Amino acid sequence: MIHDNFLFYDKLARHKKITYTLHSELEDKEELFDPNYLELIVNNLLSNAFKYTESGQSITVTLKEENNYLILQVSDTGIGIPINKQGKIFERFYQIESEHVGSGIGLSLVQRLVELHHGRIELDSEEGKGSTFSVYLPQNINTYKPSELASIDNKNEEEQVYSTNSKEMYFIDTEKVENETIESGDKKRGTILIVEDNNEIRHYLSSGLAELFNTLEAGNGEEALEKLKENEVDIIVTDVMMPVMDGIKLCRNVKQNIRTCHIPVIILSARSEIKDQMEGLQMGADDYIPKPFSLAILTTKIQNMMRTRRRMLERYSKSLEVEPEKITFNAMDEALLKRAVAIVEKNMDNIEFSTDEFAREMNMSRSNLHLKLKAITGESTIDFIRKIRFNEAAKLLKDGRYTVAEVSTMVGFNTPSYFATSFKKYFGCLPTEYIKKAKG
């Protein structure tokens, strides 16, 4: 297994012109270890070594058994780790230097997996000369609990335990958030799109948020944009450093597209300097959370955003007025809503005015107009038209200068009876009763 993982990096070693060697004293000896865990340990240590080792230098993997311990060593002649940073390298999301931006979880994950073996990991490093990570896994069977020892029958169960344990490694804390009650039904839960190229972080973010929200996943910005074409999304949570399209470009695309600019974007990034945060916020990001981050804080921020939006929509639903500046978060949405109101008002008395004609005048497809108005106001296109017409009808009836029949024509209804029936459904009383109430 170690040999297979070693060979996986052979091509990279040749490409970078790094001397790459495996020394094993074990041959075909049987050893005690979890193959899933050990594979992750080896891959993370080798990935780390290749990241900080340059052309002409060397990486050596050594495997042996001493004093009843299986010992795995990964040594490199790379940049080494400054003495003042050696105490922090096993912290979650800590990175040695900004030039090599990655997930920042590798060594924390390794340490946790080693601890699950009741083992230890040691570092010997000198700046400018290289580093050696030594993993010690006990081979005394009495070290392990009966439940920790593998059998063919419980292999699947073991893999599930691995997933549960490793979930804890990606965040500052794993406290259960005291969450508000989430109403049942997919629409009520809201949908979060998680954009992250690291499979492990993406999976555990998704698992952590799935208790409260519907989740979608994408491996980079381009994949995220495709997801947005096919799904209604309430909030986007994205990393910055990703292949194909990074988080900053994704944010710009989302915020500059009239179809998606209403969607809040939360950026998670190991780049925590003020200038990096400013770049994200200037692209329209609604929040910027530096790594390491707390899942509890992320969850609370998402809930707060959704709660604010929900309250705004509730106020809108109770009001007759359509006030774009009060229910939108950005200039594009405000401009779109003002234009939509103006078009409906222009066609106030047009009995033939339909959602198709509305969409044509807005230069949008009918489905996109529906989705956009639903996202901003919480109502369908038909409800949006009806709200503006009934608002005008209420004003005209209060004014008292027109009959119910005249008002019905002025707001685009073809018969007074249909107007009266629709008016009662909307206001809970007939137009004649509304006039009496208005007069007091």
Image (cartoon, rainbow, N blue to C red):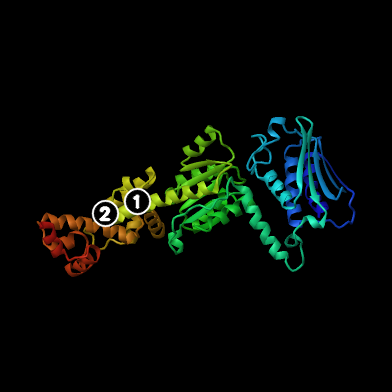
Snapshot quadrant of residue 51: top right
Q: Amino acid at mark 2?
A: Ser
Between the residue at mark 2 and the residue at mark 1, the CA separation in whole angstroms equals: 11 Å
Along the line of sight, the residue nearer the viewer: 173 or 131: 173
Per the rendering, the mark at residue 380 is none
Q: Secondary structure at mark 1?
A: helix
User: Is residue 362 among the parts visible in the rendering?
Assistant: no
Q: Quadrant of the C terminus?
A: bottom left
| Mark 2 neighbour density, 10 Å: few (under 14) some (14–19) many (20 or more) | few
Type of amino acid at the residue the image marks with label 1: Met
* Residue 91 spot, x, y in % from top left: 65, 41
Front one among 281 and 74: 74
Front residue of this view, candidates 251 and 122: 122
Which residue is identified by label 2?
A: 319
- Dot 2 lies on which element? loop
Q: Of label 2 and label 1, which has the lower sequence position? A: 1
Determine which residue is flagged by label 1: 312
| Tag 2 and tag 1, C-beta contact below 8 Å | no
Whether residue 191 is situated above or below residue 76 in the rendered picture: below
Quadrant of the drawing holding the N terminus: bottom right
